[in-house]
Image: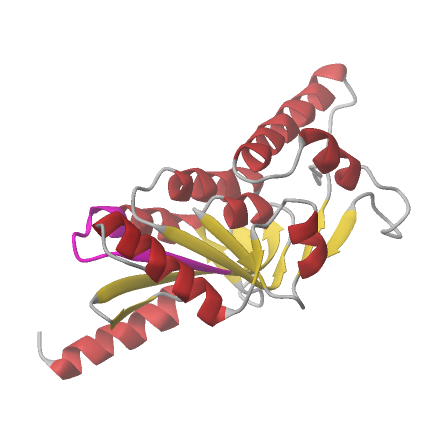
Amino acid sequence: MNENDKNKEKKENIREMGSVVTESEGITLHLITIIGQIEGHSLLPDTQKTTKYEHILPALVAIEEDERADGLLVLLNTVGGDVEAGLAIAEMISGMTTPTVSLVLGGGHSIGIPIAVSCGVSFIAPSATMTVHPVRTSGTVLGVPQAFRGLEKMQDRINRFVVGHSHITTEKLVSLMMNTRELVTDVGTVLDGHEAVSCGLIDKLGSLSDAIGALKGAVRLMRGERA
């Protein structure tokens, strides 16, 4: 593949999937973006920016199996979206042997939280926010105990994942989700960057250079080199 073809492929990847590959200091990094609303089994309107899980999952497999891929950087600016799609992406990332780092920019709300904490190291910009709230559903809901028990079990799955991949406790996470004094028409809590780190949800405050530096450090550590 000549240089023109490589540039064309790179532009196409950015346009279609928000992904790019960078090479510097002998390290090849892959970037994936989680933006807008995470789309699940139903198509969202063309007017909405979406992240399609059927695009992200194969891309993650390709990165994990690519011997040239040294690390993965995940950039998030998402309002959340489909719970199962978001959890699927988070589980895939957490199961990778390729070093991973996430960076929350703008927002990493709702089901975006498990994706943010799924990486080996998580960063958040000081100006970014994360909304922690219980599972919600729309449409017709049967008013029977089994329906509410189903929502509880879904919430338990999310809580276990977040607690298992961050430094927040279950008690603290639940208290943030069930806060009734902050959101006008909902329960939950909006955390800024400092608060997200302070409560143990995210590892570090930082910018793009911090995230890339940490990822390159993890790659060098895996190689047995000096960081």
Residue 191 seen: yes
Percent coordinates x, y for residue 190 in the rendering: 76, 53
User: Who's the residue at 41% across and 59% down the image?
Assistant: 214
User: Who's the residue at 60% across and 39% down the image?
Assistant: 167
Residue 71 painted magenta: yes
Quadrant occupied by the N terminus: bottom left
Residue farthest along the top direction in this orientation: 145
Percent coordinates x, y for residue 19 in the rendering: 36, 65
Q: Which residues are magenta?
A: 62-75
Quadrant occupied by the C terminus: bottom left
Of the pair 214 and 179, the residue shown nearer to us: 214
Residue farthest along the left direction in this orientation: 1
Of the pair 22 and 42, the residue shown nearer to us: 22
Residue 106 painted magenta: no
The answer to whether residue 25 is above or below residue 131 is below
**Side of 207 relative to 12 (left or right):** right
User: Who's the residue at 51% across and 44% down the image?
Assistant: 86
Percent coordinates x, y for residue 170 in the rendering: 68, 30
Residue farthest along the bottom direction in this orientation: 4
The answer to whether residue 58 is above or below residue 24 is above
> What number of labels is visible?
0
Residue 41 seen: no
Percent coordinates x, y for residue 117 in the rendering: 53, 45
Of the pair 92 and 206, the residue shown nearer to us: 206
**Side of 79 relative to 22 (left or right):** right
Q: Quadrant of residue 159?
A: top right
Q: Quadrant of residue 12?
A: bottom left
